[in-house]
Image (spheres, coloured by chain):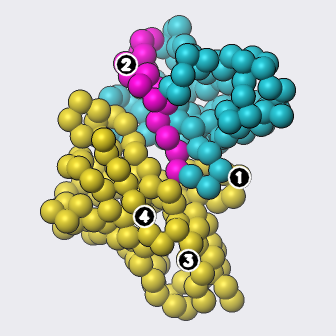
Amino acid sequence: GAGVSQTPSNKVTEKGKYVELRCDPISGHTALYWYRQSLGQGPEFLIYFQGTGAADDSGLPNDRFFAVRPEGSVSTLKIQRTERGDSAVYLCASSLGQGPYYEQYFGPGTRLTVT
Amino acid sequence: ELKVEQNPLFLSMQEGKNYTIYCNYSTTSDRLYWYRQDPGKSLESLFVLLSNGAVKQEGRLMASLDTKARLSTLHITAAVHDLSATYFCAVLGGRGSNYKLTFGKGTLLTVNP
């Protein structure tokens, strides 16, 4: 079956611009997560959705970052006024449910480069 | 705050040799995962360890968990070039955040012929 998909796979943008990154979770998965992986580091948690609502957005670095999941399926991570420090791979994951019994399945990521 | 430390961060091995990667974490956790990541690719789940004393093996890789010591190991037996990749351990957050994975910095493994 289809896994988690993310678009675009690569995004190059200029400093100060606005970007949107899209995540399509596995069909039927109610939980969705965004992580950010900077060069040479492990992924870091950004935000978690259960259904349509953001259950935990404590990992978002500042108010330039925002994510939505309006219909409980596809999610969009939005970054305003991008900065060079935002350059990273943004990973999306989904799971069938919430909690320790449900494994998170990761997508291929979107590599964001801010010039 | 949950912290996860891996060592070594870089590991260069010869084919046929054995080695162990260590993962320490700071607080009680429900689960520990090991992932593999090839350059430019996403994370591939290798093992999930649930309880103290858990041991899992797949091919040349064996993972174990000691929850009392808050330590997991990934042992590589008779390494082959195809095992070259970055390996991450990740710990599922404790009470109140049992959906959040906290990752180590990763171990870049290079297996030389």
The answer to whether B11 appears left or right of A81 in the picture is: left
Q: Nearer the viewer, mark 3 or mark 1?
A: 3
| Marks 4 and 1, the one that precedes in the sequence | 4
Q: Which residues are magenta?
A: A42-59
Task: Determine contact: label 2, label 3, CB under 8 Å.
Answer: no
- Dot 3 surroundings within 10 Å: few (below 14), some, or many (20 or more)? some
The answer to whether B51 appears left or right of A68 in the picture is: left
- Dot 2 surroundings within 10 Å: few (below 14), some, or many (20 or more)? few
| Marks 4 and 3, the one that precedes in the sequence | 4
Tell me where residue B12 appears, x and y as whole percent. 60, 81
Residue at figure coordinates x 34%, y 34% from the top left: B99
The answer to whether B93 is drawn above or below residue B71 in the figure is above
Q: Residue furthest top?
A: A70
Disc 2: which residue: A55
Disc 4: which residue: B6
Disc 3: which residue: B11
Residue at figure coordinates x 37%, y 36% from the top left: B100
- Dot 4 surroundings within 10 Å: few (below 14), some, or many (20 or more)? many
Q: Chain of mark 1?
A: B
Q: Nearer the viewer, mark 2 or mark 4?
A: 4
- The verdict on a common chain for dots 4 and 1 is yes
Kind of residue at disc 1: Gly
Q: Which chain is depicted cyan?
A: A
